[in-house]
Image (tube, coloured by chain):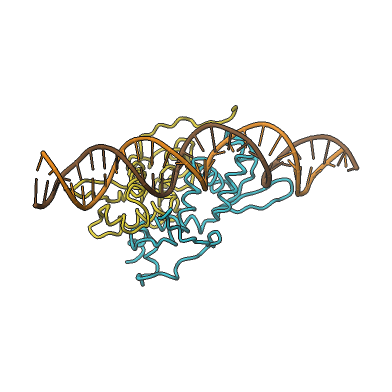
Chain colours: A cyan, B yellow, C orange, D brown
Amino acid sequence: MSKQQLSVVDTPVIDPAPDAAADPASGAGVCCSPLACAPLGAEEAAELAPLFKAIGDPVRLRLLSLIACHEGGEACVCELTDAFDLTPPTISHHLKVLKQAGLIDSERRGTWVYYWVNPQVLQRLSVILGPRVAAVASQ
Amino acid sequence: MSKQQLSVVDTPVIDPAPDAAADPASGAGVCCSPLACAPLGAEEAAELAPLFKAIGDPVRLRLLSLIACHEGGEACVCELTDAFDLTPPTISHHLKVLKQAGLIDSERRGTWVYYWVNPQVLQRLSVILGPRVAAVASQ
DNA sequence: CTTCTGATTCGACGAATGTCTAACCAGTGA
DNA sequence: TCACTGGTTAGACATTCGTCGAATCAGAAG
């Protein structure tokens, strides 16, 4: 062990609307979230990567989509579990991962637990990847 | 072992512009790639997840950004390696992962190897996550 | 041909991940 | 209170992942 950097970023989880501040050499404000605008700093990357990693699993990606698409904007765990050939604990685990990433949130209502998507976080990731969103929006 | 699904999707890697068809209950056409429009199918999820997983690592996310931001739209491996406290083999490994995912491509030019980003793939991921991109683009 | 530099491949190893079963917690209703 | 259903936690296990050092490949320059 002589290499390794890691920079120990201990950002909590995500907090809804982070950036827009602390933006070195950019000025544009709206523009420079995108990946292709300014090189991502190590800390920023360390904060974002876990979000992409969370949706980097087929089951979690589908879970996210199922929740987002569900009428009322929220879905009960039992409905989600039925959509997969996986055991309840496994589904529960994946939901936990998504929740810890800040992508979804949940609430118990009587016997059932409901999950819903946090659209701001999803939106942020979209902007990061989309180079032209800024271009379209700018002029 | 009695569960497990997997569905054995063997889609090659990505192919540039897939969907745009097969769209239940929408009409908008452009709209419904997004996650939140229609529930992602198992095959679709199995195809997309590896892409998100590829950028679900801080090093790879930074690599992608560094390449995308680099003047000329391409970057030499040596420049990329210098940006990290990681050994060349490790950087090479991450570049390989990104390349296999279809996010970047490369070419040897004399002694050096240059990498560049495949913007279509990035764009696609952005659309998948972003509910509003369609709204902006469709106008 | 030999040597040098840039980059990748190979093999290894510890850490993290996805899945399961078993056990447990939280409400509901008799 | 007791039993039942929905969901999570705990622990185990095989697989995958990220990293490294050593070896190898690919051109360039003597």
Residue B43, x across and y down, in percent:
45, 35
At 34% from the left edge and 66% from the top edge, which residue is drawn? A138
Q: Quadrant of residue A31?
A: bottom left
Name the foreground residue: B97 vs A27.
B97
Q: Is residue D3 above or below residue B30?
A: above
Q: Quadrant of residue B138?
A: bottom left
Quadrant for the C terminus of chain B in the image: bottom left
**Residue closer to the observer: A3 or B75:** A3
Q: Is residue A40 above or below residue B123?
A: below
Front residue of B96 and B138: B96
Q: Position of residue A49 (x, y in %)?
A: 45, 54
Q: Is residue B74 left or right of residue D29?
A: right
Is residue A79 visible in the rendered image? The answer is yes
Check the image and name the residue furthest to the top. Answer: B2
Residue B82, image x, y percentages: 31, 58
Q: Residue at x 32, y 50 (%)?
A: B88
Q: How many marks?
A: 0
Q: Which is more toward the observer, B124 or A26?
A: A26
Residue B36 visible in the shown view: no
Q: Quadrant of the N terminus of chain B?
A: top right
Q: Is residue A97 left or right of residue D18?
A: right
Residue B56 in the figure: left or right of residue A64: left
User: Picture coordinates of residue A23 (x, y %)?
Assistant: 40, 69
A78 versus A72 height, above or below:
above
